[in-house]
Amino acid sequence: MLVAKCVCSLRLDNEHVVNLKPLLFSDLSDFEGRANLVKCSCGLVQKILSPEYVDELESSYRHYGKEINSTARITPLPVLEFGSKHELISNWIVQELREDNKEFPELLDWGCGNLDLLCKIKERTSERSIKLSGFDKFLKPIIKSQNFGIDFLESMSDSRSRDVLYDYVSAIHVLEHATNLPREIESILSVLKDDGKIFIQVPNLDANPYDIYVADHTHHFTSNSLSKTLEKQGIEILSLDSRISSKEISILARKGASSPAHIGKTDSSNSGNQGFDFSEEPKTIAFYESFANEWVRAIRGIENNKIIAIYGLGIAGAWMLKLCRELAREVSYFIDDNEQLSDFTFKGIPILDSRLFVNNEAISMVIIPFSNEVAREKGKNLWKIGVSSLFLNSTLNRVDVYTPS
């Protein structure tokens, strides 16, 4: 077994490793390999990054940009999903820019993808003179950045050669992909002014345990472990909350050294820390070990004559489809609350608008890969029209058939 160190410099406990399978990429495409999951005593859950695994990931990144067009044409996920989030993220960033009221500020979007976020920021700051730049190590934008007044950097040497430091850097869904997390953070800090600020967003593992099955997510954060990680790298957290989504952790930070007392005080004054409990004991590695096993048991227990649907198309829904197919169980439909998806299929499976689902009498079992509260609400509505459902009771770490009390 590979011996590795955590970002906190502690040696990872390779005696307690979970083998993960099945896996998929964050763009919902399949990943045929497997990964080893380990949790450091500092609380950070992460995949063991063997040289072979890193090579496999970086090879997939090189092809990711070539696939994004075809992925968008087949189904708008993750395009639609991130499009709506970018609306909220851009509002968050623009609000901070206006509050700071700096003259001629410069913002760099680190991991800019197709420049979607920068374009939305540009729309909201048309009345101000703000310089917007984007950088992505693996993906070259499809759109022409110059048409939007955005400077796309082919490499960060473009910035350093001009001796440019930025007032703001956004790193939205970047850190969870890092194969060398300290170096990634160091690189981001190196292009930030001493009084500059960083916008960081990562998936919240506490809210979405399916994130561990994303092959290209190498680090899996909770509010506690992310705070500790950033502080270790010399980053001062100004606010931490779930303003964009309960499934994400959103952080405003700057260079410096912070303390837990500072975090609590700042979050309280900024209505931050919403939905996060720093005192809560994080899930043990045993939880993740039994997570898939519980779903395997439940899916195998579905009667063969049941017409199966999965509620929600995203990481959880795509993973559930892959698991069902590995268990030779046919899935006939997806059900989703996003009405924009109802004109599409995903891997040949029709996506139904949840508002019209009451008229579909063919479905007899719905798998709901959501949190307890959401799953119970969905399950109760399904029960009213005579449809059974499965959901993960994360309190007991078991999959239950929904029966209203």
Image: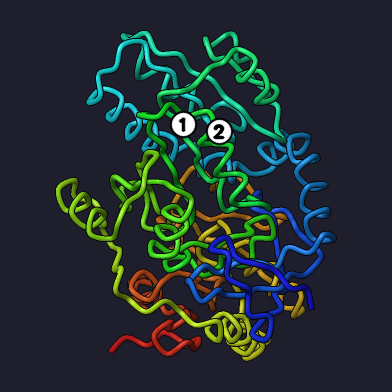
Q: Which residue is at 29% across, 45% downward?
A: 238
Instruction: Give neighbour class at mark 2: few <14, some 14-19, many 20+ (Cα, 10 Å).
Output: many
Name the residue rendered at 38%, 61% in the picture. Answer: 223
- Identify the residue position indicated by label 2 in the image: 110
The vertical placement of 284 against 81, above or below, is: below
Q: Nearer the viewer, residue 138 or 266?
A: 266
The residue lying toward the viewer, choosing from 209 and 47, is 47
| 322 left or right of 92 in image | right
Please tell me which residue is depicted at 25% across the width and 18% down the height of the picture: 101
Farthest left residue in view: 269
Residue 260 coordinates in the image, percent (x, y): 28, 60
Quarter of image, res 279? bottom left
| In front of the other: 290 or 40 | 40
- The residue tagged 1 is 169
- Is mark 2 in CB contact (under 8 Å) with mark 1? yes
**Badge 1 amino acid:** Val
Position of residue 275 in the picture relative to residue 230 (left or right): left
